[in-house]
Amino acid sequence: MRQISLVNNSISHVILPRSNATSLLLGGNPVCNDQEIPLEFCRSDYNTVIIVKKVNKTMIIVAVTISVFLLLLASIISFVIIRRLWRKVDILRQIQEEFAKNEVQPLLYSYNDLRTATQDFHPDNKLGEGGFGVVYKGVLPDGTELAVKQLTKSHQGLTEFLNEIVAITGVRHRNLVKLKGCCVKSDQRLLVYEYVENKNLAEALWDAPIESVVMHNWSTRFNIIFGVAQGLAYLHKDVQPPIIHRDIKPPNILLDKDMEPKIGDFGLALLFPILDDDQTHLSIQNLAGTRGYLAPEYAAYGQVSEKIDVFSFGVLILEVVSGRKVIDIKVHEDQRYLLEWAWTLHDRGKLSELIDPKLGGELVEDDMTQVIKIGLLCTQHAASKRPTMSNVVHMLLGHRALGDVQRDADQRQFSTELSVFESTSSLTFTDQQTMNSDFLSRDFEEGISSTSPILRSSVKY
């Protein structure tokens, strides 16, 4: 092969040989810049190695595919983030609108602050658990103690969350738990209450250690009954619009360090409008409450008035005086339903047998039986025969005569239907149905949330 070196000769044009017998070296000539010729001719010597990279089509396809995938993934992630942000903005908008409409402005806590205060909601800080969530003790950096209620996602929606805030924010009474603020982060919803040292009445009555004697004296139990009565009277009469709690029961009565009761858990509360003179109640389709504490007209027909709280309070009185639960399947069948057993003892003239034996050391039988009669009066079948909570307060103080307490035929029928229901496991109902003898569905085991706790119902005359 002939090798001809024409390096650095200012050659700007060349006709390449057609034969492989001749090899040219044209390195350093303008022709290598201006004319497209094979790189092998533009070497400066024969030892220079020319590396020509051949593009792999498969690699191009893979690169393009990966790029498209990453772009699509980035788009999806961006959409999700934007959607979450929009949802958060929408929730905050709803909250602000509800607060503005009801003229309330609770303190808004940071989720991270509450998570730190409760040690990431550690089980050791758990104070209690109800139908709508778990309550934890929290301590802020400045030493302030809080009760943080972490709402169960599947049970209480935004409406119920806002309802509890609206119902209790701004309401101040020594026998009502104080709402300090709230927190919303994504689907996490938390309510922040004042911390009470002795948990709740249910634990004090039934779960306290045997050696604990704090509930073994009548004055403590009476003060709890009286405090709850005062709190309900305030909600029904002194708050505008009046508030119907709808879930008065021992787990919802908190006790502070001095055993002073405070009504809590307003998740089912109704902001009750002022009725016309010819109205006695409103009616709703969406029921809520706990088995054993439901007034008959509410459970059967959805009729709502302050008297449904009076009924629940009457049952609460019987539980506090007797130390027994409203329904206890562990005792003899005749005593299984506390309200029915109390009426039975009343009819026999033996109400003193209902008194908790633990109170024997400080027994004031006449006072206790009078309080039991007030409880029975509050649980009259007909709502019109039940006293208002303001009158109950006066009765407890001895400022108002109790009168004769008698069980009517409707009360007996109500008790019979309750027993029939409890022994029939297959009876259920939906909240749209009119209920009669099977009105106490098993669905009320722990308390069913209505879909709209803020009252939006037609008036029934």
Image (cartoon, rainbow, N blue to C red):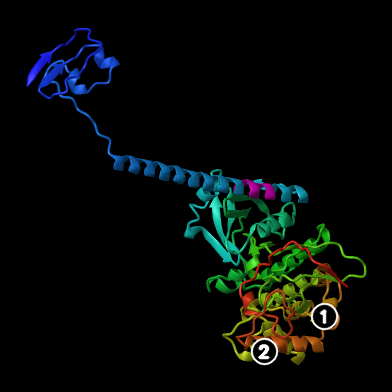
How much space separates mark 2 and mark 1, taking CA atoms?
A: 20 Å
What is the span of residues highlighted in magenta in the rendered image?
A: 88-95
- Where disc 2 sits, the SS reads helix
State the image quarter where residue 231 is shown: bottom right
Q: Tag 2: residue type?
A: Val
Residue 358, position as x, y percentages in the image: 61, 78
Crowd rating for badge 2 (residues with CA inside 10 Å; few <14, some 14–19, many 20+): some
Q: Please state the horizontal and vertical placement of residue 445, each as a whole percent of the image.
A: 61, 75
Q: Quadrant of the C terminus?
A: bottom right
Where is mark 1, residue-wise? 382
Q: Is residue 324 visible?
A: no
Residue under pointer 2: 420
Three-letter amino acid code of the residue under disc 1:
Ala
Asked whether residue 252 appears in the rendered view, the answer is: yes
In the image, residue 238 above or below residue 31: below
Would you say 157 lies left or right of 2 here? right
